[in-house]
Image (spheres, rainbow, N blue to C red):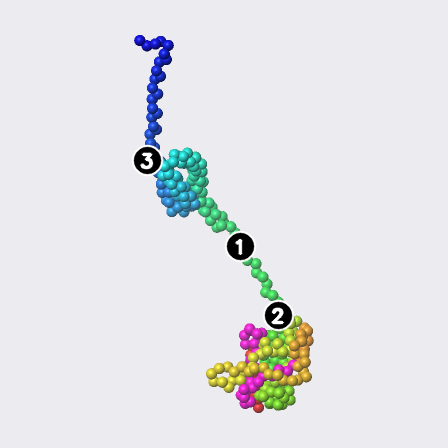
Amino acid sequence: MSNPMEPEAAAPVPAPVPAPAPARGIDAGVFVGLGLVVVGFVLALIPLWGVIGWPLMLAGLILGIIGAAKKWNPMWGSIVNIVLGFVGPGLAFVLVLTGVFAAAAPAAKDALDEALEDAPPATTQEVPAEDPEIEPEDAEPGAEVPSFVDGVLVTDDMRIEITKHKVVPAGGKGNEYGDEAVIAFWYEITNVSGEDLQAYSGFVFSMSVFQDNDPDAENELDSAILFDLESDKRHQNIKKGGTVKNVIAFTLTDETTPVTLVAQDGLFGGEIGRIDYRLK
């Protein structure tokens, strides 16, 4: 018989039942991500809808990766729910806006075309021609500008008049230190426009000197030194309307072939005219 004072034995505590292992199947996030990728790819191929196609594909790729990782860490399930909670309404809003824009674009284009057709044609105002340029004061009456006639070159900026030419042999006056004969041109140069102009540069930038004694190539003569009192202002600026006398010389390659003086309109301008000067 048991002793009533002894405590009864405690009932056995059942052992805890282990939680079932998480399923290893494919998570729904993978399917959602795959669906977004497919839908985004299709939209990317459609004009106007392509602006959301690429974001959809990117979002689908991210969700697919997260969904695939859920089977290793349940925490990813909460992350997927949060992402879907924000991304879903946002994507829906973008889809609605894009649809409205796509539907309204053709109508807006038609309205713009009609407005352009109804607009009055643009008017063109005729601008009267400017007054014809006045020939330089020193130009010959009736002479064209530019021109090179009878040893006188006339341009918009200057007037050069060749007053004399002469062959100076080696050792001759002014060519005492030269080894070859030279042809010298005495001229007067006038500043017509007021632009920077010097006697020497005005001539060499406007004149080229040749002797046609080479059957294969042009023979342009080199400038030479000729001492003359009239050339003391050759490098000074000429005032507008002012006239300076100067002399310039070129080394001859023979003393029988005529020298051709070719005038051009400035250093890079086209040919104005040419004159042959006989040596004898």
Occupied quadrant, residue 89: top left
Query: Which portion, as a residue range, is magenta?
Result: 246-271
The mark that comes first in sequence, 2 or 1, is 1
Give x and y (percent) for residue 155: 60, 75
Q: Nearer the viewer, mark 2 or mark 3?
A: 3
Asked if 167 appears above or below 53 in the picture, the reply is: below
Q: Is residue 157 left or right of residue 94?
A: right
Quarter holding the C terminus?
bottom right
Give x and y (percent) for residue 74: 38, 34
- What residue appears at the point 34 percent right and 32 percent down from the top-left corner? 22
Secondary element type, mark 3: loop
Residue at the disc numbered 3: 24
Q: Amino acid at mark 1?
A: Ala
Residue at the disc numbered 2: 133
- Proximity of marks 2 and 1: CB atoms separated by less than 8 Å: no
Q: Nearer the viewer, mark 3 or mark 1?
A: 3
Residue at the disc numbered 1: 122
Q: Amino acid at mark 3?
A: Arg
Q: Nearer the viewer, mark 2 or mark 1?
A: 2
Mark 1 burial class by Cα count in 10 Å: few <14, some 14-19, many 20+: few
Q: Nearer the viewer, residue 205 or 22?
A: 22
